Image (tube, helix red, strand yellow):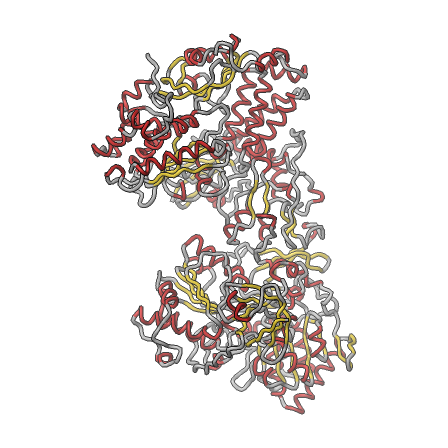
Amino acid sequence: MSIRPLILAGLDGDRTWRLQDYVARGGYEALRKIIKEKISPDAVIAELKASALRGRGGAGFPTGLKWSFVPRAFPGDKFVVCNSDEGEPGTFKDRDILRYNPHAVIEGMIIGAYAMGATRGYNYIHGEIFEVYQRFEEALDEARAAKLLGQNILGGDFSFELFAHHGYGAYVCGEETALLESIEGKKGQPRFKPPFPASYGLYGKPTTVNNTETFASVPFIIKMGGEAFMNLGKPNNGGTKIFSISGHVRKPGNYEINLGTPFSELLEMAGGMRAGRKLKAVIPGGSSAPVVPADIMMDCTMDFDSIAKAGSMLGSGAVIVMDETTCMVRALERLARFYHEESCGQCTPCREGTGWLYRVLHRIELGIGRPDDLDLLRSVAGNISGRTICALGDAAAGPVQSFIKHFADEFEYHIENRQCLVPLAVQDAGSQIYVGQSC
Amino acid sequence: MLDIEIDGKAVQVLEGSTIMDAATLAGIYIPHFCYHKKLSIAASCRMCLVQVEKAPKPLPACATPVTNGMKVWTRSKEAIQAQKGVMEFLLINHPLDCPVCDQGGECQLQDLAVGYGGMHARYREEKRVFFNKDYGPLISSEASRCINCTRCVRFTAEIGGEMELGQAFRGDHAEIMTFLGRAIDSEISGNIIDLCPVGALTSKPFRYSARTWDLSRRRSVSPHDSLGTNLIVQTQHGEVKRVLPLDNERLNECWLTDKDRFSYEALMSPQRLTLPVMREGDDWHAESWQIALAFVSSALRNVVSEQGGQALGALASPHSTLEELYLLQKLVRGLGSENVDFRLRRSDFRSDDVRTGAPWLGMTVTDIHDLNSILVIGSFLRKDAPLLAQKVRHSALRHGLRVSTVSSAAEDWRMPMSTRVKVPPARMVSILADIATALAEKTGIPLASNLMQRESVKADIPGEAYAIAEELLNGDKKAVWLGNFAEQHPRAAELHLWAQEIARLSGASFGFIGEAANSVGGYFANAVPSAIGLNARAMIESPRHAYLLWGAEPDLDFADGAATLAAMTRARLVVAFSAFDSPALRQVADVILPLAPFSETAGTFVNCIGDIQSFEASTLPHGEARPGWKVLRVLGNLLELPGFDQDDCESVRAEALSGGNTRLDNTIGDVPAAKVPVPNADTLQRVADVPIYFADPLVRRAASLQNTADAALPVARMTQVTMETLGVKAGKKLRIKGSTGGVAELEAVVDENLASGCIRIAAAHVSTVPLGHLHGELTVERV
């Protein structure tokens, strides 16, 4: 099967983010087709369902199904919101989509709004990539000038306003209800669900929140047809997906491949392991996905179901590759610190538990761990997961549970011997090389 | 109805109920911290996690809606494990300083830790510490004890009407604080002390003074505003240590105003009178009750025998009990006088001749919940009746009640307002006439014939009157309320008449908010003059030879403090009955008899909806102070008056209530229009509010309340335009002259929430007494 990108295709030119450039690549054809042929919203959603497109933000929820939840008969405003609050360690695909192909997202949002009868949309962009926000505002201006947004889009009877909104960098605002709170001007804290945004979302109105990449895929689905899109991947895992590969590979970066491509192929595309070292472990779906040891990972294909079978999740597609020079205690300590810093503080298990996890891990890393620390970590992580308002608690507990499960020997060694199992000299040697000679 | 099974018990609940609601119904307790029946659901403490059939993980009972056929276990292994897990998290950063914590003994965290906490701490890292915040004189903060339940935050936003507190920062750095370090200014702020499930927010006046388990609890009734808030008075060694709300869904729910909560501090004020004191020339000396009462009875006899009964006048505070007011009027009438009144701050009594019953709210308090539209006339609602304001606010926020108001000042009521009309006091009657005329026009119902020809009925009606008329025609449940400012207005009877007409034309109920705890009870006790008697104003305008002054201070509790002081100073005999000493009392009185305040006497208050609420003494009287009804009873005996042989407070009450004066009715007959004086161009009309913490002798001496922003020194408030016309600048001292020549020096402050041509100066403060009447005209000079 040949690997052909969709969203990232043709982005190696100059100023690919301009409307003109996007149109030259076939942009807005899908929207024109819908308006011109008066394709019904139901037909659009049916196409989405046929494509087996699953949410690209992390949870992998079928997009067509999500869109069909919106009560279309609801009188008054309905919203579509794009979640570009990409803040998970390891993930950097939405940034590149917005940076080089913003009109794909805009077109996808317009189509989504059309399908769900929304009148307004917001794109919530992570606060720490401000220049991307500015570029998106420019793209919106271009789209408005070209009558692609606003009243009577392309002369049809559909009207839609789209706005950009930037956050201030809180990871929790990537949680959809915290994101909605943040747009409303409140402190970014997740809401308790139910009610779900589909019935009670932004300003209490029915709202659909999708990831940047999800929206960016929509025009391609409409253009090529749902089934063709699905066939790029495999059943239940339709289309292509962008993977952000980071860590100990020769050529880290964003790679758009068909879902179902073997991991080994992806690793090869990324130049293979740097300095020819041995693969130790992979976090396949962003920092909150459980870690997968090398041997299991090498047997996986890159799709939702295969990764789930391996005990992890595809998540946002952020593949963090770690080689044999990595100390897993230190790696986990760094992840735990992130979740400690980013817990919103609203509900007890996450507010108190993430700090506890970090402090214990920090202690182990410093060589002052205690014999019962691993049991304690397992227990605390267990008390967090499944007990919180949003998934941040699970995200904080998941890495702890999986690291200890797969690399218990390293943790035990660290506690007993007050030093790393991976000799410091090896770690130092590893951390000095960032990019292999062959690049 | 939905069927649900909790811990094997089957219950039926209404659609939309949560598991917590169902558990309450089934009598099953689910541990919780952030959940509170009166606040929105946060679902953040996670203590109420329970096991639900088919749910993959435990769910919070407070936020999970019941579905039909749901099965819930609150004490299963899974549920208990989740609850214990949460408890451990709550405790890891909690100081566990229970032995020195004021909340000890009534702490939800402490109580639940007994059931759900572990024996040993697994957390051996450093605990998080926060700096304490300064929330002002009433609330003390121990920030490290906070468990971030955000009840206080939700209270300020949802009940108080303004988000005064917030949770700043993230994760375990998250802490509760005010915005920009401000104090909490709400008049119902003390409720967050009750709401706080731990010792993070405690009462500043109470803290470290007693252990809660050592306190006795007595039911009582608030002596302050007209709502009749139910209290739990907590005492130790014969001293009131703390006041808490007693749940009463019909009145105060579970809330308390700060005035009710903290005024107890005055009970032990250094100004408490503990012995009768008598004047001898310019000197005062303490006396026994026997001698003092013998003096009083003989002096009263002398005045009455020499000058006749009508030479005597009795003026009582509307904060007195029903029994006191009843025996006082009985005593005065026994001495041959009809001069008795309790409406001390009123100046227009023309409605007395045409009233049909005791003026009251005209509706129940719980009905506020269902109102569609309300018009509040002449009221500083939020400060005069904080909990009524809270109910209006709640209804406005949650149920879309449309709130309109007409007054001379437009304060922030912290609620959504539909229409706000500001007019100078002199235009109050005419704006009500305009509204009535607009209503007549809109409904096609003609104005009442007695009102049709009034000069205030004119052809050109301002748009704002139409706007209010429109509001009042919305929906089918409507109310018109007259506030204290309207009651104290020089043409109050005409305001009453027009409000009655507005209510008739719009199909609204109408009534009075009422100034004090016994504003209705005074009528029940018949402590009002008959047709031949003098009312409060007349007793001052045509001075009496002798006054009985009951529970009121001559300078601060009257419509015209200066005139009252003058009249009483000239009187031959002034017998003051008071719980507190004061320079003004010493100036006018010949003898001051120490009264027991509400906490030391049995008594009854009749609230604004006519609830007759009796209470017992919470403590013994302080020093030689005595319950008022006993003092009057003995005095009646000494004067050999008939009918003063009651054995207990109950029999006084029964007698008072059998007098046929207990009819609640706001209806009045016709009141002729007063001649409208032409406003003097050189003077400003005074808008006098009675600040919440100056309103009665008790609260004036509550030390902590006197340190709040609401008890700030009176200033002269004017709009910028008025200031420019006068050529004065904000922040400068002004010399303000009353119509009778009295002078006060006050700081000028810009206040755009005031009608033009007005100057707002607070009443009930010694600094503004020389200005005379609440509604006088004032001239302003620069100092």
Instruction: Name the residue nearer the viewer: A268 or A118.
Output: A268
What is the x, y in percent for residue A80?
36, 37
Above or below residue B65? Residue B403 is below
Q: Residue A347 in the image: x percent, y percent?
A: 53, 37
Left/right placement of residue B292 relative to residue A298 reads right
**Outermost residue to the bottom:** B306
Residue that extends furthest to the top in the rendered view of this protein: A276
Any part of residue B515 in sight: yes
User: Is A182 left, or right, of A345 in this rendering?
Assistant: left
Is residue B51 visible in the rendered image? The answer is no
Query: Residue at point 27% right, 29% down?
Result: A30
Locate residue B675, reporting x and y percent. 46, 83
Where is the N terminus of chain A found, in terms of image quarters? top left
Q: Is residue A161 above or below residue B138?
A: above
Residue at the limit of the structure toward the left, as seen here: A37
Q: Residue furthest front?
A: A14
- Number of dots carrying numbers: 0
Residue B706: quarter of image: bottom right
Identify which residue is drawn at 55% across, 79% down.
B528
B422 lies above or below A47: below
Q: Is residue A98 above or below residue B265?
A: above
Across and down, in percent, residue B152 comes to 56, 48
Nearer the observer, B606 or A37 = A37
